[in-house]
Amino acid sequence: MAITFDDLPYSIAGDPEAQNTLDAARDANASILAALDHRRAPATGFVVERRVRALGQMGEILLAPWNQGHLELGNHSFGHRDSNDLSLDEFRREVTDGEATIDPMVRKAGRSLRFFRFPYNHVGDTADRREAFETVLRERGYRIAASTIDTSDYLFDAAHEHALTVGDEDMRQRIETAYLDYSRTEIAYYADLNRQVLGCEPPAVMLLHLNRINASVMDRLLEIFQASGYRFASLDEAQAHPAYASSPRFVTKFGPMWGYRWARDQGVKVDGSKEQEPPAWIVSYGKTPTP
């Protein structure tokens, strides 16, 4: 299975609500990189150029380790804009402007940019737009990065960030435990979904974000995969499986995991309501009630 991280160098860099961004970004990167090294897990980090610029000189410094050894940089666009809202020319600019920092970096290291991940996994809301977007990516030498396991980590991270802000250590630990429990459930769910649809379990592609909850639990999360019998692989190795020979053709304005897309392509009926939602208290924690 391949581990991937979106929104490098830090998931909320440049957002108005972000606090102590430089220190948080540096610490989160260090913790995640240490866990990957400890578990000898390759990983691909998908970069949002806007977030690099928000961190100034630190942005490129934080990306440097992701351009070495078994780690790889990928393009996640310039501004993380929703492709459903973009013209073809606007999408092309998001792709090319997203290369501003990372393309010189990978070229200097004798590498190339190989993967693009669509923000929100929105790969085209009509057949014509999807095909046009794919043409842009092919022309620039990209493959689309798949996603087969989603743990809604951004919801848990929002709750985690609030607990950190208010200094509630007990709640922080409770949120981390809930996140790991939910991850176990989702890992098993998506493995079963892919077997049901494809008749086999292709290498999984885990979708994560570079945020503070993942920084806190990454070693424990990787241990869950190992205990479940998974072997870590690069994204390139994972997507060499025949299941990834072409992107799913199913058109939707949403961003479902590949198992659901494969199911629609192949006419396999699956009951998505069986997928467990994140706990309601996670979603509501820290939210101000509407008067």
Image (cartoon, helix red, strand yellow):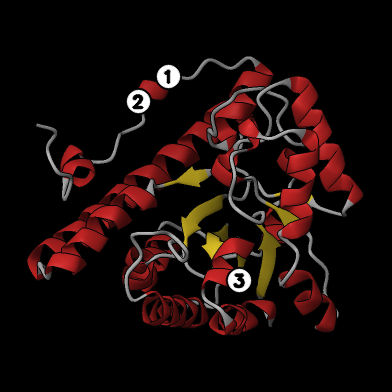
On screen, 25 above or below 86? below
Identity of the residue furthest to the right in this view: 139
In the rendered structure, the answer to whether residue 102 lies left or right of residue 268 reads right
Q: Is residue 240 visible?
A: no
In the rendered structure, the answer to whether residue 189 lies left or right of residue 281 reads right
The quadrant in which residue 170 appears is bottom left
Indicate the quadrant containing the N terminus: top left, top right, bottom left or bottom right. Answer: bottom right
Q: Residue at x 72, y 71 (%)?
A: 102
Q: CA distance from mark 1 to mark 2?
A: 6 Å
Q: CA distance from mark 3 to mark 2?
A: 31 Å
- Kind of residue at disc 1: Asp
Query: Would you say the residues marked 1 and 2 are in contact, meaning their CB atoms lie under 8 Å apart?
Result: yes
Residue of label 2: 274
Q: Residue at x 18, y 42 (%)?
A: 284
Which of 199 and 240 lies nearest the eye of the viewer? 240
Which of 13 and 42 lies nearest the eye of the viewer? 13
Name the secondary structure under disc 1.
loop
Residue of label 1: 271
Q: CA distance from mark 3 to mark 1?
A: 33 Å
- Kind of residue at disc 2: Lys
Q: Residue at x 41, y 56 (%)?
A: 228
Q: Position of residue 245 (x, y in %)?
A: 79, 40
In the rendered structure, the answer to whether residue 14 lies left or right of residue 277 reads right
Q: Position of residue 11 (x, y in %)?
A: 46, 62
Label 2 neighbourhood size at 10 Å, few (<14), some (14-19), many (20+)? few
Indicate the quadrant containing the C terminus: top left, top right, bottom left or bottom right. Answer: top left
Q: Residue at x 23, y 54 (%)?
A: 159
Residue of label 3: 42
- Kind of residue at disc 3: Pro
The quadrant in which residue 255 appears is top right
Q: Position of residue 81 (x, y in %)?
A: 59, 45
The quadrant in which residue 195 appears is top right
